[in-house]
Image (tube, grey):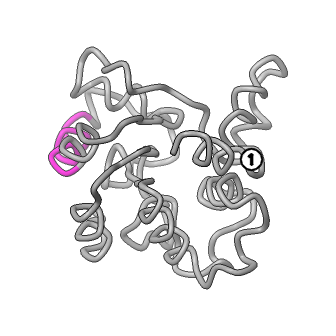
Amino acid sequence: MYELDRDYVAKIKQLQRIRLAIVGKDPYPRGACGIPFVKDTWHDLQGNSAGFCVFRSAFGQDPRKGLGSPRDAAFLFLEGGVVLLNASYYFLGEKAPIESLHRTYVADSYKVNGPILDDSELVRLCGAASKMISWVVGTMPLSFKRVPHPSMQSRNRLRNERKGEWDEWWASGRLGEWLKKSQ
């Protein structure tokens, strides 16, 4: 199990307002650092990865320019009321999650996530995270919405008619535009 970074959790608990929670599936298989979508260095966080795409969507440029590290970017997100979480803090493997095998891990992780998600104005469940969270929540609150997984690989796998859904959230600058509008 990869525990959430203690400093990150402490900062979440200090937030007056959680505008948006972005929930991924599980930690990176290599180089996970305790903050979802984040690795220790920009060199480690590949340009087509989910984390890189999330940061590029928020900052509207190559996030490696002007932000010291992915960790710095995640803490900057917190200042804007954006929290990064995973449906499971156990690495589940490359294949699609299966309820009979993985529900316990998601339920265990929800002990941490539940209070944060309850306090979030909006929750965006990336790809398989939607199905996983439904295992423990049942009926999804209206503030929860499934969105495509943010990696470029995920976008490239979508049918043409669904690429716009990905672009709506993860194209360069889109998340940043949404954050400005929703203040």
Label 1 crowding class (10 Å Cα cut-off): few <14, some 14-19, many 20+?
A: some
Image height of 181 relative to 159, above or below: below
Please report the residue visible at 74 percent of the width from the left and 47 percent of the height from the top: 152
Residue at 36% of width from left, 36% of height from top? Answer: 121
For the residue pair 159 and 172, the one nearer the viewer reads as 172
176 or 167: nearer the eye?
Answer: 176
Q: Position of residue 28 (x, y in %)?
A: 49, 60
- Report the residue marked by disc 1: 152
Secondary structure mostly seen in the magenta stretch: helix
Left or right position of 33 against 174: left
Give whichever of 28, 162 is nearer the camera: 162
Q: Is residue 164 left or right of residue 33?
A: right
In magenta stretch: residue 108: yes
Which quadrant of the view contains residue 34?
bottom left
Report the residue that reaches farthest toward the bottom: 68
Element on which disc 1 rests: helix
What's the residue at 72%, 76% (across, down)?
64
Q: Residue visible at 30% across and 72% down? A: 5
Question: Which image quarter holds the N terminus?
Answer: bottom left
Total numbered labels placed on residues in the image: 1
Report if residue 127 lies within the magenta region: no
Farthest residue to the right: give it. Answer: 160
Please report the bounds of the magenta region as a residue range: 103-112
Q: Amino acid at mark 1?
A: Met
